[in-house]
Amino acid sequence: MLSNKQKRLLFQILPFAIIPAIFSAVHLALEKGILGNHPVYPSTGNPADSNIIISVLTSLVIGFSVGIFEVRYVNAWFQNRSFYEKIFFKSLIYILAIIVASLIIIVLGHSLSQGLNPFSATVWSFVMSFLINFAFWSIIFYYSLAIVISLFYKEVSDNIGHAASLNFFTGKYHKPKSENRVFMFLDMKSSTAFAEKLGHIRYFQMLKEYYDDLSQPILNYGGEIYQYVGDEIVITWNTKKDFAENALNCFFAMKDALSNQHQKYFSKYGIAPTFKAGLHFGNVTTGEIGWLKKDIVFTGDTLNTTARIQSLCNQYGVDLLVSGDFLNAMESNGHYKIRSLGKVQLRGRNEGMELFSMKKIEHNDV
């Protein structure tokens, strides 16, 4: 069973394998229609690839390798570049790599098929004739276009979220759907005082690092970032296995992630950000909305209620408040200290709702 992190990496890598494979199949089909059963390119005498299965499998392997290289290494090199710079420079790197790899494959292919040394004049005469031929550059064009589209998809997905981009492309929420979800409204403590102390630019830089440090726990526990609202993050989980436990574990993992970075924040900004959060479970309507700018939105009382719950954290002096509905959605709560605050009248609701504070049971509490 793949972890949430592994699933995300797989979704990032797959387009680099699937898109080139599709392009390769289309290119070979067009080429087959033009050449028929002719074994070589008429203009160069180079052998023509006629096995679509081998071609597609080769494209899958090469594309998957490129995807791994992109996600593991190249993406980090251009992390602080703008969107168009990422697309341009990464595309340039991969196009050059494709040309070099194609050149190596052509040289080795000719040398093996003819039983000649790869550096022989005969082999290189074939290679050079192929390099200046339209057939070669049409192959490069198809593969390059596939890489550029893969990069574009990845960068868009990184910006709007992989779950959201997948939902857009599959049309999952083209028609509104009713579904049950957990929502977490997470708000930074003392953010106004931090902004006044640091100034807008340094505060924004700190906020960016703060969000970056919280991202990995969200990823690890299968959360989807729905919105950034100033210094507040809205995170959601659908009703997959252990969804409520994942949401709760995510909260404490984010606490630990920030705690581990206290020294960094103090040395750079003279402060250490912390947060409070509210958790609630309920029904929402989910669908695409907008004409000039499309977005997938959640509507319903569940979101308003979660926001109201989070706003009461200061009043009760706690970092986490959860609703009774959220608590009932949990399969097990043996690892947490739970304290009922009784029925609380939330703004905008006619009936009171029972709220609970939750803390993780530490070893010295046992």
Image (cartoon, rainbow, N blue to C red):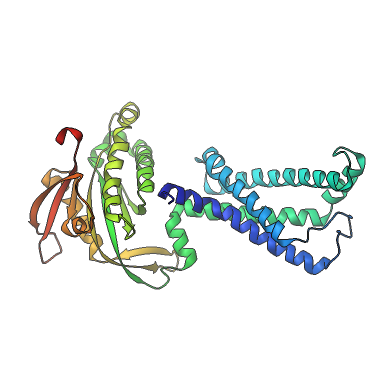
In the rendered image, the vertical position of residue 195 relative to residue 26, given as above or below: above
Where does residue 37 sit, x and y in percent of width and height?
A: 84, 66
Where does residue 35 sit, x and y in percent of width and height?
A: 83, 66
Q: Residue furthest right?
A: 122
Q: Residue furthest left?
A: 342
In the rendered image, the vertical position of residue 324 relative to residue 200, given as above or below: below
**For residue 152, side relative to residue 238 (left or right):** right
Q: Nearer the viewer, residue 120 or 261?
A: 120
**Across the whole image, how many numbered discs are drawn on residues?**
0
The residue located at (64%, 58%) in the rendering is 21
**For residue 201, side relative to residue 48 (left or right):** left
Q: Quadrant of residue 239?
A: bottom left
Q: Residue furthest top?
A: 267
**For residue 71, side relative to residue 242 (left or right):** right
In the rendered image, the vertical position of residue 167 relative to residue 254, given as above or below: below
Where does residue 38 sit, x and y in percent of width and height?
A: 86, 64
Q: Quadrant of residue 112?
A: top right
Q: Quadrant of the C terminus?
A: top left
Where does residue 130 sit, x and y in percent of width and height?
A: 84, 51
Q: Quadrant of residue 237?
A: bottom left
The residue located at (78%, 69%) in the rendering is 33
Q: Can residue 155 be seen?
A: no
Q: Can residue 169 be seen?
A: yes
